[in-house]
Structures are given as C-alpha cells and as structure tokens.
Amino acid sequence: MKAVTASRGIARDKALPVLLGCPVSHGLSARTGDVVVGWGEKENTEKARAYAQKNRLDYWRLEDGFIGYLSHPSIDDRRLSLVVDKSGIYYDAHGSSDLEKLLNQDDWITEDLTARARCAINRMLKWRISKYNHAYFDLSAELKDQLQAFKGPKVLVVDQTFGDKSIGHGMASDGMFKEMLEAALEENPTALVIVKVHPDVLAGTKQGHFDLREMATRDTDRVLFVAENCNPHALMAKVDHVYVVTSQLGFEGLMAGKKVTCYGVPFYAGWGLTHDRQLCENRATNRTLEELFAAAFILYSRYVDPFTGERIELERVLDILVAEKQMPRPTGKRVIAAGFSLWKRGFIPEFFGPSFEKTIFTTPCSLEEFEYQDGDIVALWGRSNDEAAAKVPQNVPVWRMEDGFIRSVGLGAELRRPSSLVMDHAGIYYDSTCASDLESFLNTHTFDADEERRGGALRTAILEARVSKYNVGTQGSLDFRTRAGDKQVILVPGQVEGDASLQFGSPNVFKNADLLKTVREANPDAYIIFKPHPDVLTGNREGAVPTDVLDACANETVIDADIIDCLDAVDAVHTMTSLTGFEALLRGKPVTTYGLPFYAGWGLTHDQMACERRTAKLPLDALVYAVLCVYGRYVGWPGGKSTSPEQLVEAMSQANRTGGLSKSGPIGAIGRWGRKARYLAEALTR
C-alpha cells in the first residue's frame, strides 16, 4: 500500500511515511489498495477527494496533532504529531470523524489508558506544553504587572486566525468573535477581559479577527489586548473563565480546571465539560476530561521523534518537551556574542536556534558601550571576560557557554565542530565557587521514574556505542591486569593545566604532576596508569608531566589508547575534575575526586573536597538525565538543527561502525587546514 496526494508539501514531509505507515508519493496515480491523502478540509483537496471517490479508494484527511511542534512551524518546521482521520476530521462538526466515533463508544476505555491521560495532563500543565512550544515559560514582567494591578476576576477571550477551517466547520462564523467579546463583557461586568492573539498572527503569517487599532480605541478599561508571545498555560493560570469559538486553547482551559464557554463546536464541546452556545446532536454521551484527553491525544494522534524520525508514543514526546523546559533557556531577539574566536563564529548561532533573529559578534571591551535593544542577551565563553561581563547593564541577561559532554568527533584543538555545548545563566558547570544552573537543578529537582528511566537508557546507549567526549584514540582491549597482578589498577587521567575547570574547580591540586604524587602517596601499592590529555599530547596545550615524576608515580603511561578501553581495564579512577570521572561513573567504576567537578558531591564519588551547597543524594541515572538530557544543548551536523543526546549517540555509533571515528582518515595537517578554511568562510559571512 502507498499513499498518493495532489499536494507537493505533503509529499515532501519526511515524517509522513513513518506516521502513515506507508510510502507517500506526489501525483494522483494509485492502484487498488492504495489510499489518497489530503490536508484537512482545504479547498485544494477537492481534486484528490474526487479522484478517490471515482476510483473507489479510501480518502484520509491529515492535520497537525494537538501537540504539534517543538517550537512554532515558522521557526522550526519539524513536526511532533499528526492526526489521520479515515471518515472526516476532528474539527468538522457537520459530519462524523474517527475521534467523534471513538468518544461515542465505551469499549476502548481502560484504567491504564485513563491513568496515562491523567499523568500526561499533569505533565503538560506543570511544564506548560501546548500545540506550539516556542513561547516563554512565564509571562512578561509587564503583563504580570498589568494582571496583578486588576484585583477582580479575569476572563480570557481567544482569537483565531482569519480563514481557520475549524470555524466554519465548527458551526461558527467570523462574526461570532465580536459577539463573543461583547458577551464576555456583559456576562462578567466586574471582570478584566483579556483578548489573546493567535501565535500565527504574532509570527506575521496570518490575520486575526480583532483589529489592534480598533481594540486600542475601545472606551473601556476592562479590555486587555495581549499581543505578545506568551505561554497559553501561563496566561490560563491567571484567569477564571475562558471564551472560545473553536480554539484548542479551550481544551487547555479544561485541562487547567477553568470554566470554558464555546461559541462553536470544537472537538471537546458537547461532552458535558463545556458551556455550549450550540448543540451537536451527534455527541450522545458525557465524557470525563481524562477520557476526552485519552481519545484525542493518545488514540487519535500519532507521534514522531523529531530527531530520529521514529514513530513514538505521547509520553516520549512529552519527555522531549519537558527536558527543554526544566532549565532556563536563552530567549530574546539578538545574541550579542563577545570574545568568540573566528572559527567558533561558524557554529555558535546554531546553538541559540532560529528563534533569535540575529547573532552579533563583538569584542568584550565593547560590551559596556554597546547600544542594547529590548530582547538582547549577551553570550560569553565560559569564565573568560568576567570583567567585561560585569559592565553589561543589569537588565541584559548574560549567558556563559562551554563545551558539552558528548562533544565532537576529534579534538577541540583540531577545530572539530562541536555537537554539544552547554549554556548557563547562573554560572558554569565547572565553576564550583558558585552555583550553576546545573547544580541548582540537581539540588532542587525531584526526579521521577520516567526521567531516571530515560537517563538509564541513554547511559546504556552510550556504553553500547562506546562514545566519549572526543572519541579519539586507537581502540583495542588493554591488559593491565597481567602486569598488575593482584594490585588495584587506578587510572589517573591528565588534564590541560590552566584549564578553567582546574582554576575554578580544583584549588588544592591543579597540576598533573601533583595529582600523580597525591594518588601515589594515598595508594602506595596500587598499579597506576597515567593517561595524558589528548590536547597536551598534540602539543597544543600545557600539562606535560616531568619524566622523574612519571617514573616515581606511574607504573605505565598510555598515549594513544582509547579512553573507553582504559576505563574497561582499570578498577578505579582518580581525577581532579576530568570528565573521565563522569565517564567512569557511567561504567560503574569507583571515582575519587580531588577537586569539585560537576558530578562530585552527590553521593556518587569519593570526594577529597566538600561542597556544602550540594546537599542532594542522587541516583546515577538522575545525574545522567540532568547532565545530558536537560543541561546539554545538541546540534546535528551538517544542517545545524537541534537534536537530542540519544540521536547524537546513535550518529556517533553509526560513524564508529562505518569507520567514521577512525583516526586513519585525514586528521593531519591537510584535514585540519581544510576544516579551518571551511569554517573561516562560514564565519566571515556572519
């Protein structure tokens, strides 16, 4: 079976074959057993519907699902869901749909399904997940002040885009919007009436039913026109009553426990949950909120992983969206990036994403006199340029960026483009002198079973894929045990001396030679393996250990071995602040820390320093979830679109299987200068 369509856009949508379960081709040429598909009730589907009827083929209507996109389709067009209706479409109340038929029956309802619905509703409310997920988590300070200043009840009136098919097919008309507003004012004489503009109107792609200029001239202080990009759940939390024609926000009002009045007949009206101004005789029973949600969001909708392209369930979509909202993210219009090297300019904008209109690169010394605009943020690399950061106006957010934990294929010193970075508004993960966004999250967040499960699954994938930060070194099993005998085998990973993680995270032991001496003194009988940092070996960074110290303290020095092989072959790891300690934890190895890396202080490591701020005791998989799923930011190359840690690990695993991580390729001078030239060309255009 295949699906044929008259729409080039449908045929180009990469997610549809997975969501439909069959190939999709453009052109109305089908055989017996094929299906014809079109988008909702659009006028341009008439030809496809006529073709299906003439050839006695099934016709399926497609529409965006109720949790539609990672962001807004005008910003990122990767979809999360789709509805496929074989008898109608959910917003057409003139005829029946698969969803309406389902809700008129009882044989699908189970305790497990309603429990899933209840859990999903709670997660969507807590993390403010909606159809579009580009809005700020909270309301703006100005809007908060406006709402707080009004002491009476508050009513929400929801606008929709002009030409929205759900209006006419929902037994409503364009004139009902004005009627609805007047009714809201009349029926709530002491309330503030808030008129919410549709996101597509704010994006500049469509027109709404309320005129901004007309609304501004209304002779009443009881109407507040909200023309900013605010989270609908954040706004919903401030109101008592919601008026809609057919908008999905009415259903989100039901989820939030609000009174909802419907002027049209949306999919959630007519089931005993809403106050309906119109009757829909096809809807013959009452439904609970959980039943309505289960039918629409779990059974009727189909979901796809936007990063892997795989068919998934609702809960996995929520996992993806929740992780995006659990920690502060940069929001605004322009990124003022100061002090970034030329090659970094070729990839920094991708990590902020398409929601920012522009990235302006400048020097740190210019930050004090820079002409800032509303919506600007400042980006700095790590703890560099702290003096310049102190001169940024207090109303301009400052974000620090750093290498992530699953970073790239190759060394940073060889200009390998990173696949992962982190962004921190409070500090930065390696700076133990103050709390970072990561530390605060680890200290305060209550991890649920789904989060720990995702962390555990990701940890397993990392182990199976043999992924580390740089993914360099010659792979092959190591046999330290034969030479060590019954002695404990300890790996001591070297670090780049002068690195910020040592400067701000290891005040007592901050040189590789001193670390080796300290480990040997504490473990006189151990078999100690020293592995210099790859960047030190290339001669690009400082951190070489004198020969006499190596002879006295290390039984072996391994140069080109893969770090994962080293971890597999040792009993324990002793480190200052190296990420190797975290990678050892992933593999169940005991880790002793002499500084305060981000993974120390949570009850998982043997710490030679204490951090009184870190009070939580965490399971390993909770730490993995926080560090890799929430804190890390991921970009897939080529293309520069956001991705997930799971997909990045899979891509690296695939590269490993096909030899893409091998050092036998052009890693020398020719390859390095080729990358430099390519990145330079890209950076100069920004």
Image (spheres, rainbow, N blue to C red):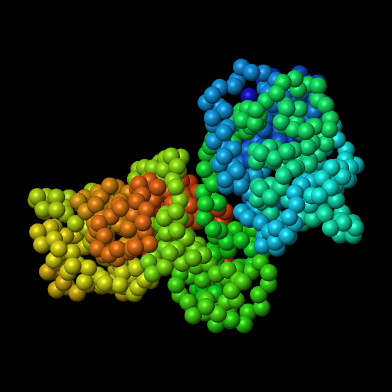
- For the question of whether residue 533 can be seen, the reply is no
Residue at coordinates 66% horizontally, 48% vertically from top-left?
237
In the displayed structure, 188 sits above or below 39; it is below
Image coordinates for residue 411, horizontal then vertical, percent:
38, 63
Q: Nearer the viewer, residue 103 or 553?
A: 103
For the N terminus, give its image quadrant: top right
Q: Nearer the viewer, residue 378 or 253?
A: 253
In the displayed structure, 106 sits above or below 133; it is above
Image coordinates for residue 684, horizontal then vertical, percent:
59, 72
In the displayed structure, 91 sits above or below 601; it is above
Position of 272 with respect to 521 (left or right) is right
Residue at coordinates 37% horizontally, 59% vertically from top-left?
614
Image coordinates for residue 410, horizontal then vertical, percent:
39, 60
Say how many tags the image has. Answer: 0
Position of 156 with respect to 667 (left or right) is right
Residue at coordinates 59% horizontally, 21% vertically from top-left?
109
Residue at coordinates 10% horizontally, 62% vertically from top-left?
524
Q: Nearer the viewer, residue 468 or 300?
A: 300
- For the question of whether residue 74 can be seen, the reply is yes
Residue 146 found in image quarter: bottom right
For the C terminus, give its image quadrant: bottom right
Image coordinates for residue 616, horizontal then vertical, percent:
37, 53
Position of 223 with respect to 310 (left or right) is right
